[in-house]
Image: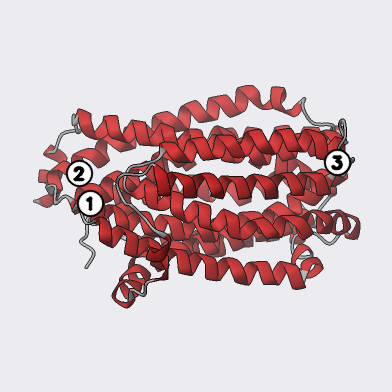
Amino acid sequence: MENIKISKIPFSKDRDFFKRFFTLTFTIALQNIIVFGVNLADNIMLGAYSELSLSGVAAVNQIQFFLQMLVMGTGEGIVVLASRYWGDGDTESVKRVSSVGMRIGLGMTAVLFLAVLIFPRQCLGIFTDKSYIIDEAQKYLAVICFSYFFFCVSNILLATLRSVETAKIGFWVSLSTLCINVCLNSFLIYGISFAPELGIVGAAIATLISRIVELIIVVIYLAKIDKKLHIKLSDYFKTHSDFVKRFLKVSMPVILVNVSWGIAMGAQVAILGRMEASVISANSIANTVFQILTVAMYGAASATSVMIGKSVGEKKSRETIIGYAKTLQIIYISFGIITGICIFLFKDFVINFYNISDTTRELAIIFMTVLSVTSIGTSYQMPCLTGIVRGGGDTSFVLYNDLIFIWLIVLPSAFLCAFVFQTPPLYVFICLKSDQILKCFVAVVKVNRYRWIKSID
C-alpha cells in the first residue's frame, strides 16, 4: 500500500527549493573547482618542472587526501546535524555543534601531524617502495604538514557556515588561495626574479602560505560580516557535554566513512605505487582532472545534505521530501552524463600541459577514459547516498555500504589483479573504480524505499 502511495507522489515543482539547491550547488562547485585547482596547479607546475617531483607530491597528496577525508567527514557531520537546527531556527545549537566538531577535527589533525612529523619515511613508504620518490616526497612533506591545522580550522568554520546556507565565502576564500598559490609557485618552484629556485620545497611553502591566508579571511568574515551566527572565539572554549553524545551518534558514521575512504584510497595508491613510477604519475594526473571535472557532483551532494536536512528540521511533510528526492535523482544523472563527456573530450588537451614520458601519457589517457564512464555512476550514487540518505538522517547506512564495497570487493580484486594475476595497470584501475558503478544499484533501491527520513534526537 505504501509503495502505491509513493508511486503516486509527483516530481517536485518547488521552485524556491530548487533555486536554493542550484545556488548552493554551484557556489560549492565553484569553491571545489578552485580547491582542486590548487592541487592541479601544483600538479601541472611541478609536472613541468620534473616528473620525479610530480611523483613525490603524488605520494604526499595521499596523506593530504586522508587529512581531507578526516576534516571533510567532520564538516559533513556538522552539516547533517546543524542544518536540522538551522531549519528550526536554533542558531545557538548550530554553534555548539560546530564547537564539538572543531575539537574532534583538531584532535584527529594533531594525531596525523605528529605521525608524519616523527615518522615521515614510514608514512610515505606506505604509498611507494621506491626510495628516490620517498626522498623527494619527504622534502615536500616536511613543510606541508604545518598547513594541516590551518586547513582543519578553515574547513570546519566553512562547513558551519554552509550548514546555514552561507556558501559564497567559501568560493572567495578558495579563489584567494588559488591566486596566492599559483603566484608563489611561479616564483618559488622555478626561481623567477628575486626568488630562489626551490622546486618541490617551493611548492610546499606556497601552499602553506596560502592556507594561512585562507584562515585569516574566514576569521575576518565571521568577525565582521556574518549576520546569521555571530560566532565568537569564546564559543569554541565552552563545554557542551550534552551535544557530544548527539554529535557522535549522528556524525561518527560520517567520519568513519571518510576515514575508511581515506585509508582505502591510500591502499589503492599503495597497490599502484608498487607497479611502475609511470603508473603513480598517471594515476595522479587522472584523478586530479577527475576531481576538477566532478565539482558539480560534489556540490550537489553537499547542497542536498543541507537542503534535505533543513527540510526535515522544518518539519516538512514526508510527501514533500519524497518529491524532492525523485527530482534530485534526475538532476544527478544529468550531471553525470555531462561530466563523463567533458572528461572524455578534454583528456588529450589536459595531458599536453605535462612534461611526462610517453608511457605515463598513454596510461593517463587510458585512466581518464575509464573515469569518463565511472563518473556517471559516481554522479548518481554519491549524492544519493551522502546527500539524500545521509541528509535525511540515516548516517549509518553509507558507512556499512562503503565498508562492504571497499574492503570486500574493490581492494581484494585490485590486489589479485596486480600481484597474483599480474594484469596490466588498466585492469587494476578498473577494479579500483568498479564500486562507482556497482553502488548505483544499491542507491536506486535505498533512496526509492524512502526509509531514510528520520528524526535526530
Which disc number belongs to residue 450?
Answer: 1
* 225 displayed left or right of 453: right
Judging depth in this view, the residue of 224 and 246 nearest the camera is 224
Can residue 360 be seen from the camera position used here?
no
Amino acid beneath label 3: Glu
Mark 1 touches mark 2? (CB < 8 Å):
yes
Q: SS of the residue at dot 3?
A: helix
Above or below, 323 against 155 in this view is: above
Could you tell which of marks 2 and 3 lies nearer the N-terminus? 3
Q: Is residue 447 above or below residue 454?
A: above
Can you say which quadrant of the picture contains the C terminus? bottom left
Name the residue tied to disc 2.
322
- Between the residue at mark 1 and the residue at mark 2, the CA separation in whole angstroms equals 7 Å
What is the x, y in percent for residue 96? 33, 65
* Residue at position x 55%, y 50% in the image: 215
SS at mark 1? loop
Q: Residue at the spot x=66%, y=67% of the render?
A: 113
